[in-house]
Image (tube, rainbow, N blue to C red):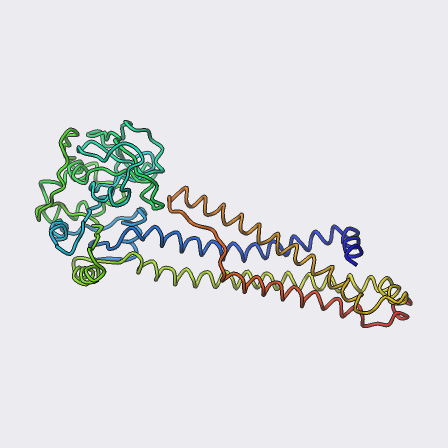
Amino acid sequence: MIRFILADIRRFRAGALAVVVLIALSVALCTVVTLQERAVRLGSARAAEKFDLVVGAAGSETQLTLSAVFLQPAPLPLMPGAVLAKLAADPRVAFAAPVGFGDSASGFPVVGTTTTLIASLSPQLAEGRAFARLGEAVLGAEVPMPGGAEIKPMHGTAETGGHTHTELAYTVTGRMAPTGTAWDRAILVPIRAVWQLHGMEGDHDEHDEHDHGDHAFEADESEAHHEHGHVDPAAPIDERFDADMPGLPAVLVKPKTIADAYRLRQEYRGETTLAVFPGEVLTRLYATLGDMRSLLLAIAVGTQAIVVAAILLVTIMHVGARRRQIGALRALGIPKRSIVVIVWGELFLLFAAGAALGISGGYAAARLISALLTARTAVRLPVEFSAADLPLALGIGLAAALVSLVPALVALRSSPAEALRA
């Protein structure tokens, strides 16, 4: 019986191939949507695990998280430097690391911060040592620059019309181990160097803070008219912060306990500052992403229904065209159940082949998309199946079995004599 089915498929191989391809495309779409949504959710959650609490100026929670944790380009308002000094001195805080944005080099963001954050992200450096002077830098794991290289920062990016700072060139002293976060594609430099390079340290009045408020990741056209500060690259870093500090877009905070984390978040959610748990913000984003996934899945399922209906129609017409052959088989004494199994098995085999091809193709497509996104963001997006996918796979198999049964029952509607006279 299997040989008969395979022989029949080979006889009509062009049509069989078309059926397999159509089914594979519809199943692949469903697979890509499911796997990619899960990859983004898991990858972003794992990347945010290293950041417990983010404090910034009052504004958008989502934008603060995307900029401070995922280093997504966006202008952030500055909060008073006194917030950093207060956090650094708080006994509930293990460490408070400032982050300053605005510059880039070779397409990679240059982020001003402290050695404490470097030690938190990468307890053991993959190469070299952390910066110890204002003119030194540490690379993320995915930044393709050698140790000892000189980096000339550019205000903003080349795409936004940024201009290169000629006052300072950072020297690479080390490289972090891979973290699986966006910081793998960052260039970390002393925060004081960023402040001094942009003329912020030493003049911290409110007007200056707002002038530099759009300093985060966006080249300000008026920046060309601002006086840049002088930076002594050989000067040792100073990571002691007091209330007379320039404004800054965000502070990454490591609370000592979970209770401290909740107290700090409550304390710094006010009119001038905003404190967020990145994981909590991502959960709300996942809800939106989940709605989009449901919509895309509905579209994919609708596409599958249309494809199955078209295939079913063609198959019924094909069975009708083979009434004489089926009638001859029945006249020769072939049992009805054998006829049903042959017709059902032929179509079900095509459905199974298409589904298998679609699942493998969708998995490969999801892996490719994740690889492209990881190359751009450095956030690892794991593409993997889970137990939650089993009901969907079983549903597809059950639907294929039931749909394949329809042409088989149609083949038995007429008697062998009527079929042979047709």
Front position in the image: 129 or 184: 129
Residue 197 point in image, percent of width and height: 18, 36
Front position in the image: 353 or 58: 353
Image: 191 above or below 403: above
Residue 240 point in image, percent of width and height: 11, 43
> Which residue shows up at 77% across the image and 51% down it?
10
- 154 vs 381, left or right, is left
Q: Could you say which quadrant of the image residue 338 lies in?
A: bottom right
Image: 356 above or below 413: above
- 65 vs 422, left or right, is left
- 67 vs 17, left or right, is left
Image: 410 above or below 127: below
Front position in the image: 102 or 374: 374
Quadrant assignment for the N terminus: bottom right
Q: Could you say which quadrant of the image residue 390 lies in?
A: bottom right
> Which residue shows up at 24% across the image and 55% down it?
53
